[in-house]
Amino acid sequence: MVATEYVEVVLPGKVEPEGLEVHSGLPLPVPAAGQVLVGVEATGVSFAEQQMRRGRYYDQPAFPFVPGYDLVGTVLAAGPGVGPELVGRRVAAMTKTGGWASHVALDAADLVEVPDGVGAAEAETAVVNGLTAWQMLHRKARVRAGQTVLVHGANGGVGSVLVQLALGAGARVIGTASGRHHDALRALGVTPVDYRREDVPARVRELAPGGVDAVFDHVGGPGITDSWRLLAPGGTLVSYGSAATRDAEGSKQLPVLALLGRVWLWNLLPNGRHAYFFNVWAGRAFAPNRFRARLRADLSQVFAALHRGEITARVAAELPLARAAEAMRLAESGTVAGKVVLVP
């Protein structure tokens, strides 16, 4: 039966997860010129949504809106100017918002095809998380075989993909995580460090006396200085979040601007080290075609690695879209490894 209505989850304001609203019985979106209608098969709960419900995401839209940073689904219909050959294909897209719905109209130019043999939930774990990990590792830090890297949050959505890609590139990986995740990290080949019980900088210096070649830091806050100081000469710090300020009050822009300021100052120092604040959306506004080409190329590499088994999808849980509040609570609990996936 062809659907005539769709469901979406709305974030009405700064609310607890139980304040999310499920709206059903809505008329299906009609794809405009250059767009397609995608039947969503999987969408995820990322750190961005956790920040958005607190009003803490740097450039989130005004409330109310539909969250959902990325999705995987099947093209159901094509709008004017889009070739009919897209219909029936499984695709992935980064949306930033709007993904928590059963059906979404998207620009065809923003879609990346998912290889046969990769399930929707598996692919979903690798969209924004995999793309972020790939670009930080290969486009920013340019990690090579024989180097040593430090990954904070090695059990998380981005971190779990990042450590696998780094190991696949021949790097030695040190990963911070709570103790419950250490056995799983050791099984991958990661040297774990317990950020709750150990002095992380001291322990990393024991493991890498000469410093590490790259640090991937999603935490931000005061600890970002420790990440910088742990770098070996010529090393690279990639900061890609401000998890330390998730529950803070005040300006949502200030933590990001503070990180940008530190990065700018550190890059002026004549010590050969480099620092970046990574934004997966960088370049979209000024060079959209180049941005899309790079996204398509890099995400295709991630999907290929997933298809070959070089990286493993870490699905922490799959929950129905109507249980988005429960999914948000689970993702925020810090007890799961990988990504919580919503299945409309």
Image (cartoon, rainbow, N blue to C red):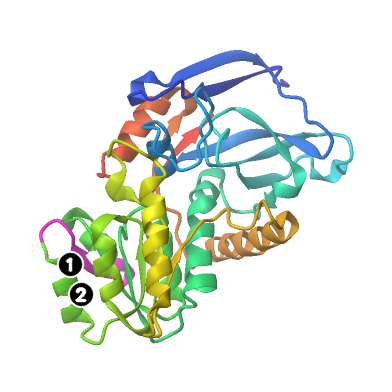
- Residue 275, image x, y percentages: 41, 71
- Residue 62, image x, y percentages: 52, 28
- Residue 131, image x, y percentages: 54, 58
Residue ID at (14%, 56%): 196
Residue ID at (71%, 17%): 4
Q: Is residue 214 left or right of residue 143?
A: left
Q: Check disc 1 and report the residue beneath it.
A: 200
Q: Amino acid at mark 2?
A: Val
Which quarter of the rendering shows the C terminus? top right
Q: Is residue 64 left or right of residue 33?
A: left
The correct choice, above or below, for 92 with respect to 297 in the image is: above
Q: In front: 42, or 299?
A: 299
Q: In front: 309, or 145?
A: 145
Tell me the tag on residue 334: none
Which quarter of the rendering shows the N terminus? top right
Q: Amino acid at mark 1?
A: Val
Query: Circle 1 — which element?
Result: helix
Asked whether the residues under the numbered discs 1 and 2 touch, taking CB atoms below 8 Å apart as contact, a structural biologist would say yes
The region drawn magenta spans: 186-197
Mark 2 residue crowding within 10 angstroms, few (<14) / some (14–19) / many (20+): many
Instruction: Please say whether residue 175 is visible from this viewpoint.
Output: no
Q: Residue 106 in magenta?
A: no
Residue ID at (22%, 67%): 192
- Residue 150, image x, y percentages: 31, 71
The correct choice, above or below, for 14 with respect to 148 in the image is: above
Q: Check disc 2 and report the residue beneath it.
A: 204
